[in-house]
Amino acid sequence: MAYIKNLFDKNFLEYASYVIKDRAIPDVEDGLKPVQRRILHSLFEMDDGKFHKVANVVGHCMKYHPHGDASIGDALVVLANKDLFIDKQGNFGNIYTGDSASAVRYIECRITQLAKDVFYNPKLTEMIDSYDGRNKEPTLFPAKIPVALCIGAEGIAVGMSTKILPHNIVETLTAEKACLLKKPFTLYPDFPTGGLVDVSDYRDGLGKVVVRAKLDVSDPKRIVVRELPFGSTTESLINSVEAAAKAGRIKIQSINDFTTENVEIEIKLARGVYSEETINALFAWTECEQSISVNLLVIKNKLPVVMTVSEVVTHHADALVKILERELEVEKKGLLDKAHIRNLERIFIEERIYKVIERMKTSEGVKKAVIAGFEAFEEEVGPRGVSAEDVETLLKIPIRRISLYDINKAKAEMEAIQTRLKEINAHLKNITVYALDFLDRIIDRIRAMEGGGKRRTEVAKFGKVDVKEVVKKNIQLKYDRATGYLGTAVAGGTVTELSPFDRVLFIRNNGTYAVQDLPEKLFIGENAWWIGAADKEALANTIFTIVYKEPKTGYPCIKRCVIEGWIMNRDYALAPNEAKILLIDPRKKFSFTVFYAVKPCVKITQESFNVQDFAVNNIKARGVRLVTREIDGVKTK
C-alpha cells in the first residue's frame, strides 16, 4: 500500500506540475502559454511574407505540441483574434456574435512585423528538444513588452487558475515608459468588445471589475445595445434578456439582433414601459452588467506566482533593458568579427598574400604561409591577430571576388560598420533612452495598424444596482380565509403586493409563525392572524401584542415582542402549547377590553387595558397574566 501511495503521489505531483507550467498558465517573460509559443515559433519558421493555410501551420506546429490539431487550431484562432501578432485572412469567427471560425483548411494567416519586433531573436532564444527529440523549440521568447497584460489569459490548472484581463497595448507600453522614467502610472483593462468598466475594486489586477454594455436610450420606447460587456456575445446577451422577460422581471415587446460589423441589439419595450425605468432592470437581471474577478497568476522563474499589474510592468521594464543590452552586445560582437575579417580580406587581397600559397603543397603549409604573410602587417591586423578560423575563411574567397575586389566598396563597408559600432556604444551608455526610443517605435507601428491601438472600453464609475429596488412589487399575494390557502394562485382576496424576492411571514390561528418564499399555493390554516412581507428592517420596528388563555386555568395573559430572526420554513410559537389565541395585533398603541366569564355574585363583567402599559419582552419569554379570572373573549378599540 505504501508503494502504491508513493506512486500515486509522485504521478499526481508530476501531472499537476505539468498542467500548471506547460499547459494552462502563461509565463510572465513572454506572456504566452506553451501552445501559443509553439504556434508563433512555427509561424517564424514558415515565414516567407505570404499567407499560409492555417491547416499547414497546425500541421507544422504538431511537431512541437503533442496534444492534437484541434487544440492548436482553436488556440491559433483565439490568438489571431487579438489582432496583434498574427495577420489573418478569411473567416476567423466573430467575437461579437460568438460565431466560430471556418475550418482550418479554409483560412490563412501569417506572422506580423510587430511579433517579429517583440519576440523574434534566434540568437537570444534558448532552445530545447521537442517532445520527440527530433526538433528544437524555444523555452521562452525574449519578449520586450508585457504580452500577458496586452492579450490577457484565462486557464484552469490543478489547484489553481488564472484570469488576466486584456489591457490596451499603447497604454501598457506608455506605462512601461513611465516605469523606465521612474514616474507613477496606472493601468486599467481594455476589452475588444468595448462597453463600460468600473475599476473601483480592480486593486491593481488582484480584485474585480464590473463591466456594462453601452446602451443607447435616445428613444424612450426602445433600448439599443451598441457595445457588449466583456465575456458576453450577442447571443448570450439576448438569451439573458429573454429569460428576464419570461420571468416577468422586465417587460419587452420584442428583441432583434442587427449586428454586422458593429453590435446593434434592439430591445422594443412593452406598452406603458419606458427606457429610463428599464435600464437598471437590464443591469440587474441580464448580461448587460457582469462582475469579473481577476487573478493575475503567472509562471515566474518556473514557479506559479500571483503578481500585480504594476509588478508585471516593472518586471518587463527591467527585462526590456536587459534584452536590448544583450541584443546590442550580440550585434556589436558580430560587427567586430565582420570588421576584423573584412580587414584581413583587404590585406589578403591588396598585399597579394594569396600568392604565397601557390608554392605550398600541403594544407598545413598553406595555413602557415598565410599566417606568415600577415606578420608584416601586424599593426593593421590589430590585437586579435590571425587565427586558424580566419585563415579558413580567407581561403574560401572565390577567385572571381579577388579579381573584382573593389577597394572603395570595401572602404565604404568598413566605414558603415564603424559608424554602427559608434551608435551601439552610444546606445549602451544610454540604454534607458534607447529603450524609450524602442517603445516609441513600437507604439508608432501599432498606431499605423488597423484600429490604431485606441482604447475601446470606457472607464466609468457606476453605482451598484439593488435588485430588490429594481423589481416592482406587482405580484398579488392572496389568502382565502375559508379554505386556509395562501399564495399567488389562490382565488381569494389580495393581502398585499410583493416582488419575486420578497419572503412571506404569516402567523396562524394557533399562534405559530413561519417564513417562506413567495408561495404559489400554501395551506396555513383558516383565519390566520397576520400575513405580510418578511422585511427584517420593518419587522424590527413592529411590536406584536399577543393575548391568549392559559391552557390549564383559562386566565388571560399578554405578551409583547418583536420578531427579529428566523430560519426559513421552520415553525415558531408565540404562545405556550395548547394555549388559545384571543388576539394578535401589530399596533404599538391601542387598548382592548377583556370580557369575563359570567358567574353568580360577580358585578364586574369586563375590564379595559392599554398595551403600552406592558413591557416588550424577548420573543421566547412567557406572557404576563392580566387577571386571575376566566374570560370569554377580547375586543380591541
Image (tube, rainbow, N blue to C red):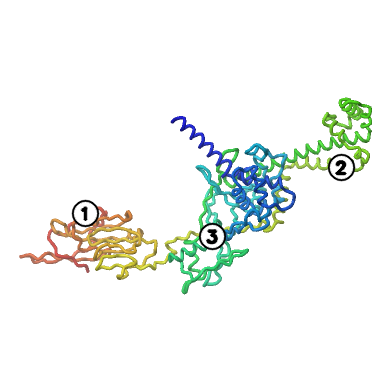
Instruction: Give the Cα separation between the discs numbered 2 and 3.
Output: 60 Å
| Image coords of residue 50 (percent x, y) | 73, 52
Instruction: Give the Cα separation between the discs numbered 1 and 2.
Output: 107 Å
At mark 3, the secondary structure is strand
Residue pointed to by mark 3: 212
Residue nearest the observer in this picture, 63 or 74: 63
Closer to the N terminus: mark 1 or mark 2? 2
| Image coords of residue 571 (percent x, y) | 27, 55
Badge 1 amino acid: Arg
Instruction: Give the Cα separation between the discs numbered 1 and 3.
Output: 54 Å
Marks 1 & 2, CB-CB < 8 Å contact: no
Q: Kindly identify which numbered label has been placed on residue 413.
A: 2
| Front of the two marks 1 and 2 | 2
Label 1 Cα crowd, 10 Å radius (few <14 / some 14-19 / many 20+): some
Badge 2 amino acid: Glu
Above or below, 133 against 573 in this view is: above
In the rendered view of the protein, which quadrant contains the C terminus?
Answer: bottom left
* Quarter of the view holding residue 402: top right
- On the rendered structure, is 250 left or right of 192? left
* Quarter of the view holding residue 585: bottom left
Q: Kindly identify which numbered label has been placed on residue 24.
A: none
Label 2 Cα crowd, 10 Å radius (few <14 / some 14-19 / many 20+): some
Label 3 Cα crowd, 10 Å radius (few <14 / some 14-19 / many 20+): many
At mark 2, the secondary structure is helix
Closer to the N terminus: mark 1 or mark 3? 3
Badge 3 amino acid: Arg
Above or below, 477 against 77 in this view is: below
Residue nearest the observer in this picture, 57 or 568: 57
Q: Kindly identify which numbered label has been placed on residue 622.
A: 1
- On the rendered structure, is 166 left or right of 365? left
Closer to the N terminus: mark 2 or mark 3? 3
Q: Identify the residue at horizontal 52%, vertical 56% (top origin).
A: 210
